[in-house]
Amino acid sequence: MAGLHDAIVSTSLDSNVVRVIIAGALGLFLGLEREWSHKSAGIRTFTLVSLLGAVFTIVDRDVLLFLGGLLVIVQGVLLAVQGLLTDESEGLSLTTSVSMLVTFGVGVLVAEGYVIVGVTVAVVSSLLLVLKRELHSFAWGLSREELRSAGEFAILAFVVYPLLPTGDVRMGSVTVNPRLVWTMVVTVAAIGMVNYVLIETYDGRGIAVTGFFGGLASSTAVVGTMLDHVRQHPESASYGVAAILLADAAMALRNLVIAVAFTFGTPRGPLVGVVVPLGVVVVGSVVVAASTADWSEQVDIDLESPFSLRNVLGFGAIFALVVLGGAVTQEQFGQTGFYVTALLSGLVSSAGVTASAVTLYTGGNLEGPTAVFGVLLATASSVFVKAALTASAPDRAFAYRVAVWSAVLLVGAGAAALVVAV
C-alpha cells in the first residue's frame, strides 16, 4: 500500500496541471501578506506572477521565460518608483518588488519538478514578510560585538566547511570524517547562539527561559546567576534549584540530540541507547522544577557574547582530547581508558565528549555500548559539576537540595540504562 501511495503521489506531481495548481496556490500564499499590508500588488498579482513562471517553463521556451522574468522586474521597478512618488518607504516598495520576482521563481521551480524546493522557498519568503517587525527590531538591537559574533559564526558555518576534505580521514589509529566533525561543532555553536537570542529577546522571563534556554547557551552562567540570586534573595532558593535542574535538562537534551541525529542513517545505526537514560534526566528535571518553583518568577541571566572563536577553540580542544586521547587510552587500557577520559572531559564540556563519542563510533573506533556509556558518563559529570558549584552558596539548604535532586536524577538515569541494557 505504501508503494502504491508513493506511485500515485509521484504520478500526480508529474502532471503539468497539478504543478500549475501548486504554483498558483503558492503564489496566492505569498500574496496574502502583501494584500493584508495593503500593498499595490496583492493576492491576484502574486498568483498570476507564479502562474506566469509555471506556464512559461512548461511551454519550454527560453525566450518566453526570459521575457516573463524581465516583465516581473520591470513591474517591480515601476512599483518602487510609485512608492517613492507617493512618499512610501523605499524599503517596503522594494520588498514587494523582490517578492514578486521570488514568486516568479517559485512558479518556475514547481513547473520544473522541484516542488519541495518551491514550497520551501515560498514558506521561508512568507515568514520573512510576516516577521518584518520582529526581524527589524532584532537587527536594530544588535550590538557591535553581537554583529561581529554573527559574522564569525557565518565564517565557521559556510566558509570553512566547503574547504574540508570529504569522506573519512585516518589520523593515526583514529578514523574521522572532517565534515561531520565540523557540522557537530557548528551545531553546538548554533544552539548557543539561538538560545542567547531567546534569552536576550525575552529578557529572562520565567524559569523556563532562564533555566532551560540559558542552560543550552551556558549552563555555567545559569549556575552563577542562581548563586548570586540566592545570596541576595534567600527566599527564592526553590527557584534557583528549579533553574539549575532545567539547565541539566537542557544539557541532557542537547547531548541526546547530538548522539542520535549525527548517527541516524549511518551504516552502524543510531545510538538509541542514550534515549531512555537521557530522557529520564530531561523529564525528571522538568517534573521536579515544575513541582517545586513558581515558573513565572523572573531573573535576568548575564550571558557572554553569543559566539566567539575562543569558545569554539575551547570546544575543539575538548573534542580533540577525547577523540585522540580516548582512542589511545582505549588501545592501552581498554574501555576503562575511554571511560576515564570521557568522565574527566565531561567536567568541562559534555557536548564535546558527546560529539567525540559520535565521531569515534561512526568511524568504527568504538562499539555502540561503549559510545553510549561514554555519553552518559559525560552527562553525569556535567550534572555533578553544577551540584558541586552550588556548594559555595551560603544557603546550605539550597546546596543540599540541588545535590539531592541531582543524585536522584543520576540514580534514575543509571537504573534506566541498566534496564535498557538488560
Image (cartoon, rainbow, N blue to C red):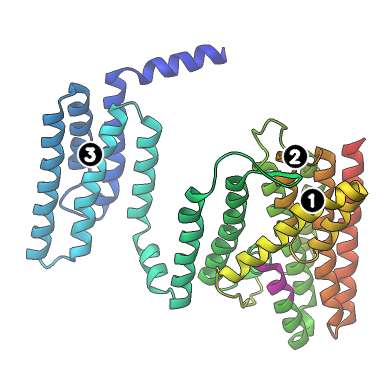
In this rendered view, identify the residue nearer to me: 97 or 181: 181
Query: Could you tell me how far apart the alpha carbons at marks 1 and 3 are, in whole angstroms?
Result: 48 Å
Residue at mark 3: 104
Q: Residue at x 10, y 41 (%)?
A: 71
**Numbered disc in front, either 3 or 2:** 2
Query: Residue 80: x and y, percent?
Result: 13, 57
**Numbered disc in front, either 1 or 3:** 1
State left or right for residue 290 relative to residue 338.
left
Note whether residue 169 is visible: yes
Residue at mark 2: 271
In this rendered view, identify the residue nearer to me: 308 or 99: 308
Residue range (magenta): 218-223
Query: Could you tell me how far apart the alpha carbons at marks 1 and 2 are, in whole angstroms?
Result: 10 Å
Amino acid beneath label 3? Phe
Q: Is residue 76 above or below residue 4?
A: below
Residue 220 highlighted magenta (yes or no): yes
Image quadrant where residue 195 sits: bottom right
**Residues tagged 1 and 3 counted as in contact (Cβ below 8 A):** no
Image quadrant where residue 86 sits: bottom left
Query: Residue 352: x and y, percent?
Result: 71, 57
Note whether residue 251 is visible: no
Q: Is residue 308 above or below residue 124?
A: below
State left or right for residue 419 relative to residue 152.
right
Earlier in the chain: of badge 1 and badge 2, it is: 2
In this rendered view, identify the residue nearer to me: 220 or 17: 220
Mark 1 crowdedness (10 Å alpha carbons): few <14, some 14-19, many ≥20: many
Image disc number at residue 375: 1
**Secondary element type, mark 2:** loop
